[in-house]
Amino acid sequence: MANEFYALLGRMRYITRWGLMRNSFSENIQEHSHQVAVLAHALALIRRDILQLPGPSPERCAVAGLYHDASEILTGDMPTPIKYYNPAMKDAYKQVEQIANRHLLDLLPLPLQAAYAPYLLEDDGSVAPIVKAADKLAAYIKCIEEQKAGNAEFESAAKQTMASMQDMALPELNWFIAECLPAFSRNLDELHIL
């Protein structure tokens, strides 16, 4: 049973997101986790280097982003409307996530468990808001991409996700929304790749 952690992580590509939505293209939690890691790293860098505010290490935020949905290897991706239907459902799901993450932690060699614990158990209070913001930002980018493909199914999800990001009131997230997010609506010819 020990040392199976990495083999299970490889199965992230089989867990599809947005299960209740008609998708123009599918997205799995491995792709999503990579994007959240990139965005969390960017948000932490923006906070530190552009806004010159104190905050957690960008590298720590990136690693936390990689593992933020690791529990879904065991639980699957529960649709947001169900996960947050009411406080009891939300609390119950949080408990299931914790149990799954503790199980994943137990599948690591004992000398590595302490290094992975902060990421799997999400116990770093300074990192969590940035990873949550990156997670919302990734969801919003998915909405943009679906809408660009002509999929109106994601219109209300885009509005709800933007409202949720604005409610976070994180200066680094607001900066990214104003300065970087518009480029996600452009096509390849409009992006200056050469």
Image (spheres, rainbow, N blue to C red):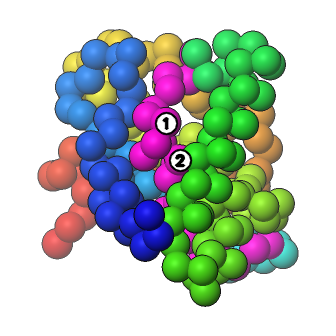
Q: Is residue 157 left or right of residue 89?
A: left
Identify the residue at horizontal 20%, vertical 67% (top origin). 193
Q: Are marks 2 and 1 in contact (CB under 8 Å)?
A: yes
Whether residue 34 is visible here, answered yes or no, is: no
Mark 2 highlights which residue?
A: 71
Whether 140 is among the magenta residues is no
In the picture, the quarter occupied by the N terminus is bottom left
The three-letter amino acid code for the residue at tag 1 is Thr
Vertical placement of residue 95 versus 86, above or below: below
- Chain part drawn in magenta: 55-81
Q: Secondary structure at mark 1?
A: helix
Q: Badge 1 is on which residue?
A: 75
- Asked if residue 89 shows in the view, the reply is yes
For the view shown, which residue lies furthest in the bottom direction? 111
Asked which quadrant contains residue 48, the reply is bottom right
Instruction: Tell me the distance, in whole angstroms, between the alpha carbons under discs 2 and 1.
Output: 6 Å
